[in-house]
Amino acid sequence: MVYHLPKFLETYKTVKLFSGQGVEKNNDVARSIVLRKSNNWDAAADVLKLESRQWDLREKERIKRSYTKKKSQCWEHELEEERKKRRKTLI
């Protein structure tokens, strides 16, 4: 490695490309899937399926739905009154 380092720096201008940081990140993500989200029967398949889903969804973005309040009176007064009634019944 020491012998090749000047050649790498001359060609690629950085050594970061060879750090393996991306591989380490993938290993951490896969480990978290196995320990938290997997059914532990076929953990390797779970990791591959999750990666495939993420790869398929990488360019898609959720579209926000429009929302219009129908009863503004409810939010301003009725909700407050309901909460007051609940507090009185709890005491």
Image: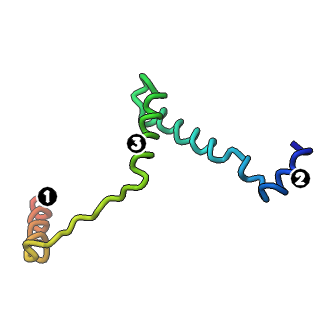
| Amino acid found under the numbered disc labelled 2 | Pro
The colour scheme applied to this rendered structure is rainbow
| Amino acid found under the numbered disc labelled 3 | Arg
Left or right placement of residue 63 versus residue 49 in this view: left
Q: Is 66 in front, or is 89?
A: 66
Q: Is 76 in front, or is 43?
A: 43
Residue underneath mark 2 = 6
Residue drawn at (7%, 76%) of the image: 73
Report the Cα–Cα distance between label 3 and label 1. 47 Å
**Residue 38 in the image, given as x and y percentages of width and height:** 42, 32
Left or right placement of residue 48 versus residue 3 in this view: left
| Amino acid found under the numbered disc labelled 1 | Leu
Residue underneath mark 1 = 90
Left or right placement of residue 28 versus residue 49 in this view: right
Q: Secondary structure at mark 1?
A: helix
Residue drawn at (49%, 28%) of the image: 44
Could you tell which of marks 2 and 3 lies nearer the N-terminus? 2
Which class describes the residues within 10 Å of circle 2: few (<14), some (14-19), or many (20+)?
Answer: few
Query: Which label is found at residue 38?
Result: none
Could you tell which of marks 2 and 1 lies nearer the N-terminus? 2
